[in-house]
């Protein structure tokens, strides 16, 4: 074979190899370009599928501004009994010293965009003083002084109250200004615990005595129907603020003796913070 023929064959072989190699490289580049774009889409789908946070935990503070619609009211009663032809006059005077503020833990569980279920454990300190004046004997109407025998008993009672309201909140609207306003309704359980009493007695002969006989509790566990209304505001940090007013009607009284009678109607104003 001559030298020119060998040159032409070498050039033809190089062109053939180049023709086979270029399409393969072109196909690989195109395939690599098609595989890269789906990655951000998969990441976006993963983000959208992440479950939102449901349960919110926080605190709630409340007050009972009207004493007659609070946890203990002032009271005064009088009664007369006759024993062996001797008249006994009993004067009872109860004064509440209960702390007006209370509070505790609050839980929120959204059921829908407009409905929220809440459960709370709220604590209040109850305290009252009851003075019992007992008179018997004969009083001389011609004098300004009271000649009857007189015994005075001062009772100081303290207790702890735990309330467990379970309420359903429903927003009036799903959007707009009224979407912050909600109505609430449900039931509340009340437990009275750690009742402690100190009695100081001044007898008719001026001698004194004392004891720790516990005051009688009418019902340690009460159930009440509760309704309320309030506003729910949520900021950019997902902190929920809920000012609210509530009314509860109890099925009985914690204390119900003489002038010491717990109100069966309760009106409270409170505010909650949760996240």
Image (tube, rainbow, N blue to C red):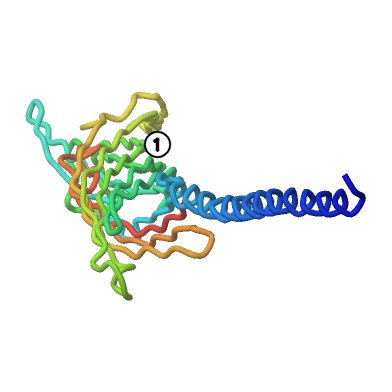
The residue carrying pointer 1 sits among few (fewer than 14), some (14 to 19) or many (20 or more) residues within 10 Å by Cα, namely: some
The residue drawn where x is 28% and y is 53% is 112
The residue identified by callout 1 is 158
- Residue 211 in the image: state x and y as whole percent: 39, 24
The residue drawn where x is 35% and y is 46% is 109
The residue drawn where x is 40% and y is 46% is 54
- Residue 117 in the image: state x and y as whole percent: 29, 47
Residue 69: image quadrant is bottom left
- The quarter in which the N terminus is drawn is top right
Q: Give the left or right position of residue 201, taking residue 111 as reference.
A: right
The residue drawn where x is 32% and y is 47% is 118
Q: Is residue 16 above or below residue 130?
A: below
> Extreme front residue here?
1
Residue 231: image quadrant is bottom left
Q: Is residue 159 above or below residue 36?
A: above
- Residue 130 in the image: state x and y as whole percent: 32, 41
Looking at the image, which is closer to me, 113 or 61? 113
Residue 137: image quadrant is top left
> Extreme bottom residue here?
177
- Residue 219 in the image: state x and y as whole percent: 22, 32
* Label 1: element kind: strand
């Amino acid at each position: 074979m001559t030298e020119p023929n060998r040159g032409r064959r070498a050039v033809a072989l190089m062109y053939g190899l180049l023709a086979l190699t270029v399409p393969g490289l072109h196909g690989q580049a195109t395939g690599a370009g098609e595989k890269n774009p789906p990655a951000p889409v998969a990441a976006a789908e993963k983000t959208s599928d992440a479950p939102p946070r449901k349960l919110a935990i926080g605190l709630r503070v409340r007050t009972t501004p009207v004493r007659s619609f609070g946890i203990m009211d002032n009271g005064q009663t009088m009664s007369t009994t006759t024993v062996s032809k001797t008249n006994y006059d009993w004067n009872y005077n109860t004064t509440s010293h209960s702390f007006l503020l209370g509070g505790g833990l609050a839980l929120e569980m959204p059921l829908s965009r407009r409905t929220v279920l809440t459960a709370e454990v709220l604590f209040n300190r109850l305290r009252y003083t009851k003075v019992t004046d007992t008179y018997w004997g004969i009083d001389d109407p011609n004098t300004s002084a009271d000649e009857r025998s007189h015994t005075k008993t001062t009772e100081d009672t303290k207790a702890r109250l735990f309330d467990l309201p379970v309420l359903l909140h429903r927003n009036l609207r799903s959007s707009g200004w009224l979407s912050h306003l909600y109505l609430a309704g449900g039931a509340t359980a009340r437990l009275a615990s750690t009742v402690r009493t100190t009695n100081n007695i001044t007898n008719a002969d001026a001698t004194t005595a004392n004891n720790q006989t516990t005051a009688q509790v009418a019902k340690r566990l009460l159930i009440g129907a509760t309704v309320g209304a309030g506003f729910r505001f949520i900021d950019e940090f997902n902190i929920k603020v809920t000012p609210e007013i509530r009314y509860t009607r109890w099925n009985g009284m914690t204390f119900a003796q003489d002038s010491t009678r717990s109100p069966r109607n309760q009106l409270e104003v409170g505010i909650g913070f949760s996240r």
